[in-house]
Image (cartoon, grey):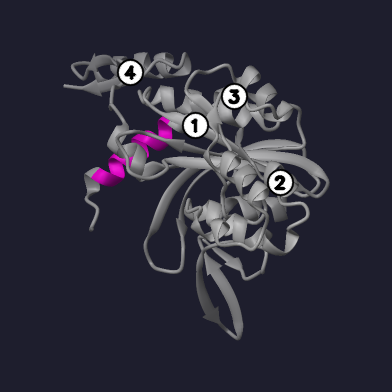
Amino acid sequence: MRRSIQDYLRLAEIGNRLRGVFELWGYLEVTFPAIEEYSPGIRKGTKLAYDNAFYLINPDPTSRIIRAFSDEEIRLFYITEVLNGSTRGEWQAGVEMIGLPGVPAEPIIVAITALEALGVEEFYIDIGSLEVWREATEGIEEFRNVVFGALIRRNFEPIDRLPIPGEKKEELWRLFNFRGRRSGFEKLDRLLRIIDDERVFIDLGTVRPQPYYTDVIFEIYSPEVGKPIGGGGEYTVGEKPAAGFYLDMMALSRLYTGKKRGRTKLSLDDPAKAYREAKGLVKLGIPVEVGK
């Protein structure tokens, strides 16, 4: 579907709101060039061949950050379009926290405040753990890929067909269907205590397909949208712990209330006076509109 100028103005407004929230949390904006030289570690993007070399157009920001900031301890955010093999992609806003205390709780809390800043109050976040599933599949490592594939598709049938003991299938079934606020897994239970938000749940059936995630992963849902509106997880940069998330800005445009902060309106009857006052108000962070 072709997007209108109003769609892009709405995306820009959402981006500005998110940018303000991320900056309040101490995150710095990182901007990448549209074209990246091809590397197996860079995810997504649309391939381009030029002058006997291969490139990617607008690939996944997290994989670019992992490669570019291997020696940093830093908080970053981005707002960009991400392509996935075609000429049209999805607009994403996200944060990445590298090598600092607070991983992975802080990025989840930042995501909550970002949604609230957009007027999105009705959402929930499901948190899962790759490590829980690695431990659960010890002894059946040869079937681990089948188990993770079933989790990604949210379909237990491939697991049910595996030639493994019934007790193991029952254990995997319980994990597959667990959703609650206390799991018995200390890392996840502690994470929920830190986040302290009733819209956040432990859902052990939640996994994400990106290969760089190491343990905790999460997805963000709204009952008004039929797919996740965001997600993220833990990963490592060098040997440093890191975590981040992205938000689907087109999905957010369906949820955004559009409530604007009040602006001080100044008349143009005396332009010099109006713009002098406007400059003073902007310096104080007060929105203005100079008009008739």
Distance, label 2 to label 4, CA atoms, is 50 Å
Q: Give coordinates of residue 265: x percent, y percent.
A: 25, 15
The amino acid on which the numbered mark 1 sits, given as a three-letter code, is: Ile
x, y percent for residue 94? 53, 40
Disc tally is: 4
How far apart are the alpha carbons under marks 4 and 1? 27 Å
Earlier residue among tags 1 and 3: 3
Where residue 60 sits in the image (x, y, percent)?
55, 56
Q: Does residue 253 sit above or below 149 in this rendering?
A: above
Q: CA distance from mark 2 to mark 1?
A: 23 Å
**Occupied quadrant, residue 184:** top right
According to the picture, the residue beneath numbered tag 3 turns out to be 25
Q: Amino acid at mark 3?
A: Trp
Q: Earlier in the sequence, mark 4 or mark 1?
A: 1
Q: Which mark is residue 136?
A: 2
| Of labels 2 and 3, the one closer to you | 2
- The tag earlier along the polypeptide, 2 or 3, is 3
Q: Which residue is mark 1?
A: 125
Q: Residue at x 60, y 86 (%)?
A: 52
